[in-house]
Image (cartoon, rainbow, N blue to C red):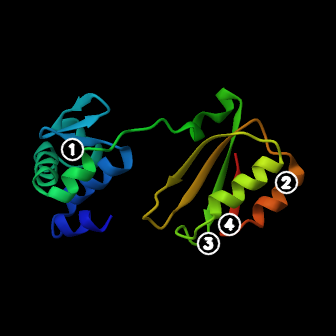
């Protein structure tokens, strides 16, 4: 998010805190950081970001004082990522590396192939959408029939496919 870079220009430790909060879905409300409804201490937040509590407090305050960031961070919510526990819940994960993460239609094409295979989608998450290591994580019920894997690899925008 470009606004984070602009607001935290010259403050790399605070920017690191803000980006970690974004990645984890931590919100800022009433001058404090929250994971869902659980208030996070400045110490815990700083430690998780590799900074101290004062850096975390400064980042939270800066977010609260910037109208655009404040409006954005107040609406964040954490989600449970099922991709790491698929064996325990009878699911599989497709990790798709896109040729270009902003290309329209990647999810639509992959979903169409999964529909044809008779496979239900449980969750779709874009991991690190602004970074260099972008993955589209698709959690599905059961396994993909092997005959559909070539069709998945041929979907628009799919550079590579990793089955877990």
Between residues 4 and 17, which one lies in front from this camera angle? 4
Q: Are marks 3 and 4 in contact (CB under 8 Å)?
A: yes
Q: Residue 98's spot in the image, x, y percent?
A: 61, 66
Question: Disc 2 versus disc 3: distance between alpha carbons?
Answer: 20 Å
Q: Residue at x 25, y 62 (%)?
A: 4
Q: Secondary structure at mark 1?
A: helix
Q: Are marks 2 and 1 in contact (CB under 8 Å)?
A: no
Q: Which image quadrant: the N terminus? A: bottom left
- From the viewer's perspective, is residue 21 above or below residue 159? above
Residue 53 vs residue 48: left or right? left
Q: Secondary structure at mark 4?
A: strand
**Which mark identifies residue 148?**
2
Query: Label 3, label 4: how many angstroms apart (C-alpha)?
Result: 6 Å
Q: CA distance from mark 2 to mark 1?
A: 45 Å
Residue 158 is labelled as 4
First reached walking from the N terminus: tag 2 or tag 3 = 3
**Label 1, on which residue?**
46
Which residue is identified by label 3? Answer: 99
């Amino acid at each position: 998010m470009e606004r984070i870079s602009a607001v935290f220009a010259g403050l790399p430790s605070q920017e690191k805190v803000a980006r970690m909060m974004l990645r984890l879905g931590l919100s800022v409300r009433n001058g404090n950081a929250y994971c869902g409804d659980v208030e996070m201490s400045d110490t815990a937040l700083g430690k998780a970001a590799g900074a101290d509590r004062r850096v975390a407090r400064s980042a939270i305050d800066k977010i609260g004082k910037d109208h655009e960031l404040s409006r954005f961070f107040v609406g964040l919510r954490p989600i449970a990522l099922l991709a790491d526990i698929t064996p325990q819940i009878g699911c599989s994960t497709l990790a798709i590396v896109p040729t270009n993460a902003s290309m329209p239609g990647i999810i639509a094409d992959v979903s169409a192939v999964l529909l044809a295979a008779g496979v239900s989608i449980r969750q779709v998450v874009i991991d690190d959408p602004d970074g260099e290591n972008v993955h589209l994580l698709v959690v599905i019920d059961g396994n993909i029939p092997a005959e559909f894997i070539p069709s998945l690899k041929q979907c628009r925008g799919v550079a590579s496919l990793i089955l877990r």
